[in-house]
């Protein structure tokens, strides 16, 4: 379903097609859409950015603006230049800085990735040529503008949950007792969404070919 279609549906549901109410509903739809998308790393939000070259000139890279698909979170990264493909291990800026004082001058094939806010960087630092990577993450929800015919990120199967979340806001604003029914229905559908989602199941454990303590021996989870 598109943003504009859902806004129109809500307006018809509450029987108010004024421009003032449309503006309010558009804000509520954006708010509810952001909240649902950020609630969990939903399987239907997964996206893969393939064959992207990361090198000195484009790192660190903002995952919300630097990829063809804006991402909210990185799930895993595969080195496509390696044969067979080699997974990078997740780390932190603190662990990288704790490795050595002149860590920025350390050169080797990148083995770790880490985030600073919404920017991604590699360690050891990428060189000028760079390497090709496949990055899997969750899509970032953006705000829709008035009349947008762009499809919502929430799949059609679960649009009803988004609808009831917005209806709750609308009925509450109108001081209508149907707000209680709407929030109850939203919570019921959210529970169903959670029960059927597989995004937080067992994850693939990639075999790592490099020596386990070759770079960052202080990493507890990965070394």
Image: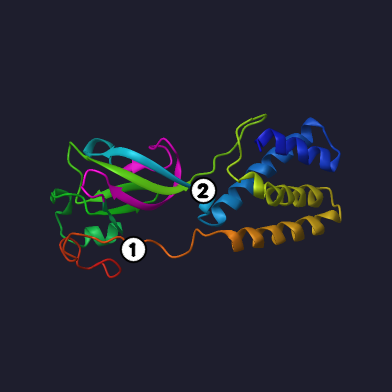
Disc 1 crowd rating (10 Å Cα; few below 14, some 14-19, many 20+) is few
Q: Would residue 164 be visible to someone looking at this image? A: yes
Q: Which mark is residue 36?
A: none
Left or right, 159 with respect to 93, comes to right
**Secondary structure of the residue carrying numbered label 1:** loop
- Say whether residue 65 is magenta: yes
**Relative image position of residue 93 (x, y in whole percent):** 29, 56
- Label 1, label 2: how far apart the Cα atoms are: 21 Å
Which quadrant, please, contains the N terminus?
top right
Which quadrant, please, contains the C terminus?
bottom left
Q: Would residue 118 be visible to someone looking at this image? A: no
From the image, tell me which residue sits under label 1. 205
Quadrant of the rendered image containing residue 90:
bottom left
Quadrant of the rendered image containing residue 197:
bottom right
Residue occupying image coordinates x 69% and y 52%: 161
Q: Which mark is residue 45?
A: 2
Which range is magenta?
A: 60-85
Left or right, 21 with respect to 129, comes to right
The one nearer the camera, 63 or 204, is 204
- Say whether residue 33 is magenta: no
Residue occupying image coordinates x 41% and y 35%: 68
| Sequence-first disc among 1 and 2 | 2
Q: Is residue 153 above or below residue 112?
A: above
């Amino acid at each position: 379903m598109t943003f504009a279609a859902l806004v129109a549906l809500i307006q018809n549901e509450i029987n108010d097609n004024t421009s003032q109410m449309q503006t309010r509903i558009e804000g509520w739809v954006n708010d509810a859409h952001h909240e649902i998308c950020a609630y969990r790393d939903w399987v239907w939000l997964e996206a893969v950015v393939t064959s992207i070259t990361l090198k000195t000139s484009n790192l660190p890279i903002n995952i919300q603006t630097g990829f063809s698909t804006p991402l909210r979170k990185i799930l895993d990264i595969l080195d496509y230049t390696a044969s067979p493909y080699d997974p990078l291990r997740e780390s932190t800026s603190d662990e990288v800085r704790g490795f050595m004082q002149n860590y920025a001058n350390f050169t080797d094939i990148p083995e770790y990735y880490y985030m600073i806010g919404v920017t991604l960087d590699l360690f050891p630092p990428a060189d000028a040529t760079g390497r090709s990577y496949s990055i899997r993450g969750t899509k970032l929800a953006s705000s829709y503008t008035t009349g947008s015919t762009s499809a919502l990120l929430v799949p059609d199967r679960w649009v009803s949950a988004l609808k009831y979340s917005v209806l709750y806001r609308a009925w509450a604003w109108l001081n209508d007792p149907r707000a209680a029914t709407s929030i109850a229905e939203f919570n019921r559908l959210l529970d169903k969404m959670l029960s059927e989602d597989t995004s937080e199941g067992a994850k693939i454990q990639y075999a790592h070919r490099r020596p386990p303590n070759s770079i960052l021996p202080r990493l507890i989870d990965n070394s």
